[in-house]
Image (tube, rainbow, N blue to C red):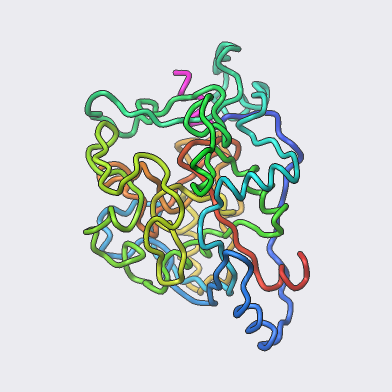
Amino acid sequence: MVVCFFIAMGCKRQTSDKIEITHSPDKTISKKILDSLIQNPPKDMVWIPRGTFLQGAVPQDNMAMKHEKPRHPVTVDGFFMDITEVTNAQFSKFVEETGYITIAEREIDWEEMKKQLPPNTPKPHDSILRPGSLMFKKTKESVPNLYDFSQWWRWVIGVNWKHPSGPHTNLKGKENHPVVHISYEDALAYCKWARKRLPTEAEWEFAARGNNKNTMFFWGDERDGLSKRANSWEGEFPVNNTLEDGFERTAPVKTYPPNNFGLYDMAGNVWEFTSDWYNVNYYEELASKKDTAINPKGADKSYNPSNPYLQEKIIKGGSFLCSDSYCASYRVSSRMGTSLDSSAEHIGFRTIVTPEQLLFKE
């Protein structure tokens, strides 16, 4: 019961002033200047050229969920994207320079938390409402109902980005792993410091496809060889991981081959935040307009009938927990919603920056 508070309903804590990062207004940049930027990209970033594609599940994807449909035409302008997920080393530098304290390290505010819960939900014991984050724990036997997440998620007090595998663990040897136990607000704070932003869902999916516009995975339609392409779950979830890919949890960035744009871990390893609200009706609404959407920023508000009290953002890419029997979210079109203020050991992020942001210091 206690775990359900932190899984399905977020983990509301005392928060700092909300950080909002908006898209840059259109500005004219000469081809010469743009070419110079592309030839000299920001450190550890790669240029993603302007393009048009059909966002959403491809027709041959028999694992696609309803909220991945229908496909709809989208055009995104060019941008630079981190070639890897933000690492522990990179996030450590941000914290050292700013003194930032992540959501998982802050005291939980019950008055705020209960606003996201059904009316009259009883308050958990104070010993439970302490700083921490969600951690995965393998089950001892097969699980017949894979919709009951509480069977493998545990709220662990003292876990956060600095102590990712338990309250007494540290980052030694994991400097090049993706930072985890990060909330949406934490990701925005990093973006503000780095003068970058989170990608929209459309930008993320276009970049992940790497010009493979009509395939299930960024490398094609065949799942064969997944363990050599992405950090995912092999074996029966959540009871037995055969470790074919070499890792039980996160893997160092750049462990697996990049996509055609030179981006690593666009499938598996950790889920990645986007700036879009999660709204189950959004794809249908966008498709009904018939016209190609230009730089869509997502739904105006969050809507998920399964979690009506939550405000959720879209995460993409899947994680080390994804398997064919569970979520299969290493597919490019896969998408999930997660609470603004919750964190877990399988969620991280990467950033993007536009030429306008670089030139006009926005």
Q: Is residue 188 above or below residue 82?
A: above
Residue drawn at (56%, 33%) of the image: 309
Residue drawn at (62%, 26%) of the image: 113
Image coordinates of residue 3 in percent, x first then y, are: 46, 23
Q: Nearer the viewer, residue 337 or 190?
A: 190
Judge from the rendering whether residue 18 lies leftward or rightward of residue 164; answer left or right: right
Residue drawn at (29%, 65%) of the image: 59
Characterize the magenta stretch by its predominant secondary structure. Answer: helix
Q: Quadrant of the C terminus?
A: bottom right
Q: Is residue 128 above or below residue 182?
A: above
Asked if residue 265 is among those painted magenta in the image, a careful observer would answer no
Image coordinates of residue 140 in percent, x first then y, are: 26, 23
Q: Nearer the viewer, residue 182 or 177?
A: 177
Image coordinates of residue 282 in percent, x first then y, are: 50, 55
Q: Quadrant of the N terminus?
A: top left
Per the rendered image, the range of residues in magenta is 1-10
